[in-house]
Amino acid sequence: MDRETAFEFVTSSIRFGKGATREIGPTLADWKIRRVMVLTDKNLVRMPPVHTVLQSLDDAKIAYELFDRVRVEPTDESFQEAIAFASQGQFDAFVAVGGGSTLDTAKAANLYSTYPPADFLDYVNPPIGKGVPVPGPLKPMIGVPTTAGTGSETTGVAIFDLVHMHAKTGIAHRMLKPTLGILDPDNTRTMPPQVAASTGLDVLSHAIESYTALPFDQRTRPPHPSLRPTYQGANPISDFWSLQALRMVAEYLPRAVEDPDDDEARSQMILASAYAGIGFGNAGVHLPHGMSYPVSGMVRDFHPPGYRTDYPLVPHGISVILNAPAVFRFTASACPRRHLEAAQILGADVRKVSDADAGNVLADRIIHYMKRLKVPNGLQAVGYSNADIDKLVQGTMPQHRVTKLSPRPASAEDLARLFEDAMSYW
């Protein structure tokens, strides 16, 4: 096998600061934008972040149409509704105001309306779709996160539920990255504590997964530089951003959840989300995310507190973190020092810990945060049992984009044991 010898680091431009949302109108005017599609969801549309964006556009005399039908945890059907709106509107830019679901929906609307494919699955990651590369540059997009978790304002990934498969998949390409991410701490004031916990734990797992991912130089070199994947494996630049994000999570996440008026903690968590996004957006994530997709996609009747939806939902950050302790116990043998470094940042005393215990120590620290933030105790708490394991494994196996980045390869039998371990932790 011809090993990879290079990696490429790409990210969106970032603008951080209280009140930065008010600069969207002048920025789009500088870009000579005339007509904008603004995307949000039906709950956020009545709240200050959206009002601020629309006022900024009005003040800059930029025409816009508002699409407020984004689905929290989007599906192929909700994507296609936004795509149809974008295709009919003749927009020359997109502004997404909300969580990762809104930003991902805007990326899809931008792509599919700019370069309509023959079939919806053409751009979707293989083996579910064809993984056709994005043909060229997309229209300008500004991402305005109102949660501190997904880092979607920095990444070239759009995730959705493929309804007929009951599993998540996605689209990944560097061209999908937003042109600009607006990190305005004022916009996270609308987050309920349970949403802050879920999204913040997503940051935690992003950081650890990207730091412990298969190193970039253990992958196969692509036949052409343009075919180098968006998720390239752990690399020296991503390592820096991921570890700094983890340090910020350790210090600020409990504060941000337990006191929504803690301005410093909220500011630092929206930065941590972007830092982790910059890290994993180039290195990738692995098994906790790969296993999370069927957990979200197969949900039956779980309705999480803090999420105003009329349909069952396992929030993305929860579906990820419920798998994380089991996974890191499994992967630690591949790179124990990296697992121990993550555990140390999260507060563990690792001075006398052997490499053989690295996975347990890291898992215990993650469980500590899960307990403190009142996360459900394992997959059983969100409606799953051992009888579901075969289907959960089947839903994970096609997630090659992330599962192949595990530092320790996981067979179907391994995944079954991991899901069994994740059923309950305490």
Image: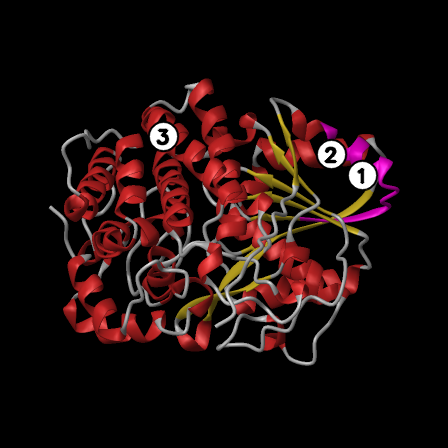
Residue span colored magenta = 23-38
- Return the residue at label 2: 24
> Does residue 308 appear to the left or right of 299 in the view shown?
right
Q: Are marks 1 and 2 in contact (CB under 8 Å)?
A: yes
Q: Position of residue 256 (x, y in %)?
A: 38, 26
Front-lying residue, 98 or 17: 17
Q: Is residue 275 magenta?
A: no
The single residue placed furthest to the left in the displayed view is: 426
- Nearest to viewer (mark 1 / mark 3): 3
Dot 2: what SS?
Answer: helix
Q: Earlier in the sequence, mark 3 or mark 2?
A: 2
**Residue 72 drawn at (x, y percent):** 48, 53
Residue count near mark 1 (Cα–Cα under 10 Å), binned few <14, some 14–19, many ≥20: many
x and y percentages locating residue 113 in the rendered image: 73, 65
Left/right placement of residue 422 relative to residue 237 reads: left
Q: Is residue 244 above or below residue 166?
A: above
Label 2 neighbour load within 10 Å: few <14, some 14-19, many 20+: many
Give, as a three-letter code, the residue at label 2.
Ile
Please state which amino acid type lies under the numbered disc 3.
Leu
Q: Identify the element where label 3 is drawn.
A: helix
Q: Secondary structure at mark 1?
A: helix
Reading the image, the residue beneath label 1 is 28
The three-letter code of the residue at mark 1 reads: Leu
Total number of numbered discs in the rendering: 3
Residue highlighted by disc 3 = 253
Residue 25 visible? The answer is yes
Q: Quadrant of residue 69?
A: bottom right
Is the residue under label 2 in contact with that under label 3 (CB below 8 Å)?
A: no
